[in-house]
Structure formats: structure tokens, C-alpha cells
Image (cartoon, grey):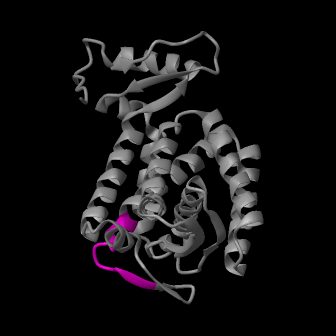
Amino acid sequence: TMVIVEEDAALEPPIQAKRACPACCCFSYRVPTLRELYSQDKRLLRAILLIVVLLNAPVGQYILYPFMLFSTWIHELFHGLAAISVGGSITWLNIYPDGSGLAYTAIPAGVFQRAWVASAGYQSTAIVGGISLMFRRTNMGARIGTCGIGILMLFTCLLFVRNAFGLAVLVLMGLSLIVAGRYLPPFWIGELYALIAATTCLNAITSVRVLFFVTESNIGGVTSTSDAMTMQNVTKIPYYVWSSLWMVLALWMTAMGIFINFETQQKQQSNDAVIEGLQDDRHPLTMTEMT
């Protein structure tokens, strides 16, 4: 027996691991202090500053619009992937001009299957945003990540997206990301990647906020319950509990993305030199380690 499920997206716009080998492509893992974040993470700080400015500028919402659609695409894509993981399938996946989206899936009947698919959207957006942030300091990670996102976007258009707006926007975004990932200089591809990761984390947080007030919406001419309300119907646990859990996850993954990062060894050696200078006894400021 198969159950047809519609999933919607809410409207809203120093610990260092041992290095495995001396190769320059290896990655090191570290949890930075606040001082290190300030000295090393200017890329992330610039992204955050730009987001703050755009959120308060008259034209800011138009510049951030593609990033909102990107987060909606992630949300709906993972509803579909969750359906596939439990033996179901994606019928279609649409993105709409108001920033909403709808994934129409078929899954085997069962409480677990419905709960797994319904909860996948908000959780996955938070996880993708947090993990993306972890690679913001690597030029190679930014280049591969940007191109990879573009290729996956085109792949989903070929297989699942069926509405004209969704196809037009996602194809344009996918091609733009591939070209940017391939041809932009290291500085600018790093800036773009950091902005994508930061806005994904922000949208993961702000989109959950709507769930506390909206339990049903009309998306693409289809009236459906919110993911949190679906979880309540399936598990009998109140929708606001699920909304709160997803909010906590979004905040947690954002924090993990900020305080855990991966770097190439060449960049790590450069940062180590900076940190040594910061730890010099002659420096008027002291180091405060985050625990």
C-alpha cells in the first residue's frame, strides 16, 4: 500500500586534530577561540555584515531572494530523498515565486515512513547549512561545493521539477553556480560560498519560526498542513514541540558550522603563525577559549 504525501516549505524569505599526512590536500579539524574567529574568519564576518545590511536595505530582499529559493529547494529535495530512502518515490518537486515549495511523494504506509519524510525538510536545511559553513575557509571546498550544488540543481530539474517557474529559476541558478565555481577567482568564490552557507543557516532558523503560527497554507493551489502539524497528526506530539526541536537543531548546526571548520594544511600553517602572534605575551589582549 502506498500513501501519497505532500510536503511544504514555510514561507520566509585550541583543539587541533593530528594531521594524517603532509599532503597539502589534507584537512585539519579545530575548534577556534573567539580571538581566532576574529583574526581568521573575516570571510564569514563579511558575509554576516552583508546579510545584515541587505536585510535593512530597500532592495535587500531582491538580492537575497535567490538564496531564499535555494533554501526552499534544499527543503523540498530532502523531503523527496527521505521518501526514496524508505522505499518511496518523488512524483514532482516544485518551487514557487513566493518562496514556497511543494514535494509530492509516494511512500509505503506506516507511521515511521510518514514521520521520516515530514521531518526531513527543516532538519536537512539546518544540517546542510551547518556543514557548508564548516568548509568556508577552504578555497577548494568552496569551489567544489559551489559547482556540486549547481550540478545537483540541474539534475533535480531534469528528474523532478515540473513547474515553469521552478525550472526557469533552478536551471539559471544551477548554471550560474557551475560557472562561478569554475571561473571566479579564489577570493570571490570563497565570498560567494560563505554567503550561500550563511544564508542557508539563517533561512533554516527563520523558516521554522512560521511553524509556531501557521498550521495550514495554500501552496501552488494545493492546501496542505505544515510539516509540524503533519508530525503532530502522525505522532500525537504537539506541533509546537516539533517546531521547537527543529529550531534548536537549526541554532545548534549554525553554531557547529561557526566553531568547527576544515582547512587545508597550507592555510592552517598560515593561521598557526597568526595565532602564535596573538598568543605573544606582549599582546595587550588575552585569549579566551570557547568550551
Task: Tell me residue 78's x, y (percent).
Answer: 55, 58
Residue 61 located left or right of residue 185: left
Residue 138 located left or right of residue 291: right
Of residue 267 and residue 246, the one placed in the foreground of this image is 246
Task: Tell me residue 121's x, y (percent).
Answer: 48, 61
The residue located at (42%, 55%) in the rendering is: 123
Residue 202 located left or right of residue 132: left
Q: Where are the magenta residues, as a range?
A: 206-217
Residue 110 located left or right of residue 188: left
The residue located at (67%, 40%) in the rendering is: 144
Task: Tell me residue 20's x, y (percent).
Answer: 55, 12
Of residue 19 and residue 82, the one placed in the foreground of this image is 82
Task: Tell me residue 252's x, y (percent).
Answer: 33, 46
The image quarter in which residue 17 lies = top left
The residue located at (53%, 73%) in the rendering is: 5
Instruction: Reply above or below: 210 against 49.
Output: below
Of residue 87 and residue 182, the one placed in the foreground of this image is 87
Instruction: Reply above or below: 12 against 197.
Output: below
The residue located at (52%, 39%) in the rendering is: 136
Instruction: Reply above or below: 103 against 131.
Output: below
